[in-house]
Amino acid sequence: MAIHSCAHVALRCVDAQQTTDFYQGILGLDMTIADRCEIYQGRPCLYLHLFFKLGDGSFIAFFDAPEFPAMNTVPDPSQPKFAPHFAYFCANSAEVDAYKARLEKAGVHVEGPVVREPFHSIYFNDPNGHRMELTAHVPTDSDRYKEDAAKAAGVVRRWTEEKARLAKATATA
């Protein structure tokens, strides 16, 4: 058994049309499904479910659910700016830079490009306040993001031990 790909990431949106204008009009994704629903798990619940198709066949999806409390589109200042965010691959750095120009032309504030080998990335918020990253691989000799399951497990183990030591030191201080 193996999970072999991401089917979709599903997020709330403030407004279906505004979200469509951004993801279809600015980012150029095809909206392939818009499903108006009135029932969720046997109970009345009005919402619209939108799916925008990525180049690999996966989707980013949104729920416009007006019966629920309004979304806070302002990032929580108590959380680090880098999390959470959703990162999507482009074919190369030139495409990332072209998206930066397209987003800025549309009035979207874009940070970057930021190069952290082996990635060339830009960061921006969509109209719903969700943090997004568009990234491409760049040639590098760095092993920083080289896939290595044993090394990764060791890093997590050491991190967990370090956090425990820090928590203990803080509790006794």
Image (tube, grey):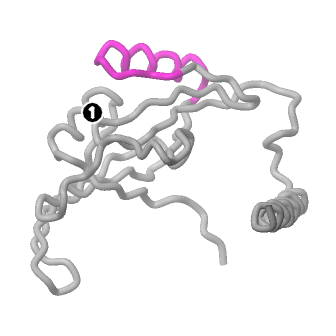
Residue 156 sits inside the magenta stretch: no
Q: Who is closer to the viewer here, 48 or 57?
A: 48
**Residue 104 included in the magenta stretch of the image:** yes
Residue 65: x %, y % from top left: 17, 60
Whether residue 7 is visible: yes
Tell me residue 130's x, y (percent): 39, 43
Left-right relation of 40 to 157: left
Q: Position of residue 151 (x, y in %)?
A: 89, 57
Residue 52 sits above or below residue 116 on the image: below
Magenta: predominant secondary structure element? helix
Q: Is residue 162 left or right of residue 39?
A: right
Q: Is residue 73 above or below residue 102?
A: below
Percent coordinates x, y for residue 27 in the rendering: 35, 30
Which residue reaches farthest bottom?
42
Q: Quadrant of residue 45?
A: bottom left
- Most extreme residue toward the front, as rendered? 173
**Residue depicted at 19% across the width and 54% down the height:** 70
Residue at (53%, 39%) from the top-left corner? Answer: 81
- The three-letter amino acid code for the residue at tag 1 is Phe
**Which residues fall within the magenta stretch?**
91-111
Is residue 153 visible in the rendered structure shown here? no
Q: Nearer the viewer, residue 124 or 162?
A: 162
Compared across the picture, whether 78 is left or right of 149 comes to left
- For label 1, the crowd category at 10 Å Cα-Cα, with few meaning under 14, some 14 to 19 and many 20 or more, is some
- Position of residue 33 relative to residue 75, above or below, is below
Q: Nearer the viewer, residue 18 or 131?
A: 131
Quarter that holds the N terminus: bottom right
The quarter of the image holding the C terminus is bottom right
The residue identified by callout 1 is 22
The number of discs equals 1
Determine the residue positioned at 44% across, 50% down.
57
